[in-house]
Image (cartoon, rainbow, N blue to C red):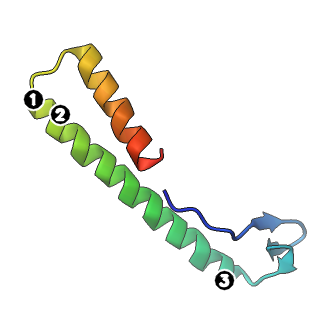
Amino acid sequence: MLRTIEKITYRNGFLLNGQRAEKEKIEEIFEGRRVAALSVWEQYEQQKQKFMLVKLTPEQYKNACRDIARALGV
């Protein structure tokens, strides 16, 4: 999963790492994080689909999904 060192807060305006920031700059960071999160989710769903094609017991499928999530850092 995407890990950034940028800390975004809001207190009477946006702050980026403790400094005032324009909304446009914050939107760019949020959009990047959103895209990264969707990418991870899509990878998770694709891997789950592969396991659905294999005949697994419900317990094996559940464990496989947990392994996928752990590998992707979800």
Q: In this view, does 71 lie above or below 31?
A: above
Q: Residue at x 28, y 44 (%)?
A: 45
Find residue 19 and report its horizontal and vertical position in percent.
Answer: 85, 79
Find residue 47 and report its horizontal and vertical position in percent.
Answer: 24, 44
- Quarter residue 23 falls in: bottom right
Q: Which residue is drawn at 62% across and 67% down?
A: 4
Residue at disc 1, secondary structure: loop
Asked if disc 2 and disc 1 are in contact, CB closer than 8 Å, the reply is yes
Residue type for callout 2: Phe
* Label 1 packing within 10 angstroms: few (<14), some (14-19), many (20+): few
* Badge nearest the viewer, 1 or 3: 1
Q: In this view, does 12 lie above or below 63?
A: below
- Quarter residue 10 falls in: bottom right
Residue at disc 3, secondary structure: helix
Asked if disc 1 and disc 3 are in contact, CB closer than 8 Å, the reply is no
* Label 2 packing within 10 angstroms: few (<14), some (14-19), many (20+): some
Front position in the image: 56 or 49: 56
Residue at the disc numbered 3: 25
Residue at the disc numbered 1: 54
Nearer the N terminus, badge 2 or badge 3?
Answer: 3
Residue type for callout 1: Val
* Label 3 packing within 10 angstroms: few (<14), some (14-19), many (20+): few
